[in-house]
Image (cartoon, helix red, strand yellow):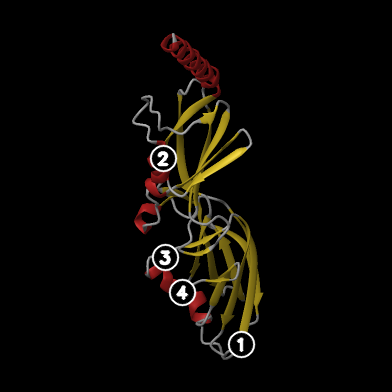
């Protein structure tokens, strides 16, 4: 008799647990992330209009991308996509008890690499995101995310006439000093998108200083070039061009002992 009662109780408990799983199943689903990186940026100063980031070695490995998944009022992060995949452990679209479960609602999947808002030499920031609708019954949603350069690249150029007249010029972009040596060392200068202040301290052969300043608008995923040139036709004029378009002309006094 005791055996019969024990068997009945066990059947009731098992049935209750099974019914609970059935009720919870519609509420959660799984997410798999398929990521890629864009190896190009816009380049307004070239005829090709594309800048190959791969040549500069700044493209992050897909496995190193930071992961953030937010939805249903909760945000979860993983330091890398490889860490997410290891914890998630979804081999394809097969059912896997180890897979992470997310509420069956809309989720935003964001991948990134680098420090957002930080600018300077060799400081690229990559980011990409997408929204997915997570199904219930522990079914799988596939998130396709392309990560692109989210900040801007800035380059300074000068003409021979400008260099002859101002042999000791220095430049800054948002207080970051421009250095041609960094370019030779295969580094790029990255700045935040938006308004940027470009300043020039141009020293003539006589030692006198001409200071120039220009505010430009930087775009994400774009390489910008600011060109300083000197025109001596009818007087000395410094022209500042931004991506091939003259945006400022500054007349300067000519000194008699300048050797330009």
Q: Nearer the viewer, mark 3 or mark 4?
A: 3
Circle 3 Cα neighbour tier, 10 Å, few/some/many (<14 / 14–19 / ≥20):
some
The location of residue 12, given as percent across then percent down, is 50, 13
Name the residue beneath numbered marker 3.
187
The location of residue 45, given as percent across then percent down, is 48, 55
Q: Nearer the viewer, mark 2 or mark 3?
A: 2
Which residue corresponds to the image point at 38% horizontal and 65% vertical from the top-left?
Answer: 186
Q: Nearer the viewer, mark 3 or mark 1?
A: 3
- In space, the residues marked 2 and 1 are separated at their CA atoms by 64 Å
Q: Nearer the viewer, mark 2 or mark 4?
A: 2
Q: Nearer the viewer, mark 1 or mark 4?
A: 1
Asked if the residue under mark 3 is in contact with the one under mark 2, i.e. CB atoms within 8 Å, the reply is no
The location of residue 173, given as percent across then percent down, is 57, 67
- In space, the residues marked 3 and 1 are separated at their CA atoms by 31 Å
Which residue corresponds to the image point at 59% horizontal and 78% vertical from the top-left?
Answer: 201
Asked if the residue under mark 4 is in contact with the one under mark 2, i.e. CB atoms within 8 Å, the reply is no
Q: Nearer the viewer, mark 2 or mark 1?
A: 2
Label 1 or label 4, whichever comes before in sequence order = 4
- In space, the residues marked 2 and 4 are separated at their CA atoms by 58 Å
Q: Which mark is residue 87?
A: 2
Q: Which mark is residue 231?
A: none
Q: Which mark is residue 208?
A: 1
Q: In the rendered view, would you say 130 is above or below 217?
A: above
Q: In the rendered view, would you say 257 is above or below 49?
A: below
Quadrant assignment, res 93: top left
């Amino acid at each position: 008799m005791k055996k019969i009662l024990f068997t009945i109780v066990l059947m009731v408990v098992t049935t209750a647990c099974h019914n609970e799983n059935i009720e919870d199943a519609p509420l959660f689903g799984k997410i798999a992330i398929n990521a890629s990186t864009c190896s190009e940026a816009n380049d307004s100063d070239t005829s090709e209009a594309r800048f190959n980031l791969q040549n500069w070695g700044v493209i992050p490995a897909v496995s190193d991308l930071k992961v953030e998944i937010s939805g249903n009022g909760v945000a979860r992060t993983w330091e890398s996509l490889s860490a997410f995949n290891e914890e998630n452990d979804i081999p394809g679209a097969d059912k896997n008890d180890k897979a992470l479960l997310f509420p069956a609602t809309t989720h935003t999947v964001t991948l990134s690499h680098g420090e957002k808002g930080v600018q300077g030499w060799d400081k690229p920031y990559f980011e990409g995101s997408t929204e997915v609708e997570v199904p219930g019954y522990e079914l799988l949603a596939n998130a396709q995310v392309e990560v692109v350069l989210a900040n801007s690249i800035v380059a300074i150029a000068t003409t021979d006439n400008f260099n002859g007249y101002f042999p000791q010029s220095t430049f800054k972009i948002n207080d970051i000093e421009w250095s041609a040596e960094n370019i030779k060392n295969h580094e790029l200068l990255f700045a935040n998108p938006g308004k940027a202040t470009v300043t020039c301290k141009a020293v003539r052969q006589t030692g006198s200083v001409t200071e120039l300043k220009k505010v430009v608008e930087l775009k994400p995923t774009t390489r910008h070039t600011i060109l300083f040139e000197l025109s001596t036709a009818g007087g000395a004029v410094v022209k500042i061009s931004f991506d091939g378009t003259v945006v400022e002309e500054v007349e300067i006094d000519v000194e008699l002992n300048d050797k330009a």
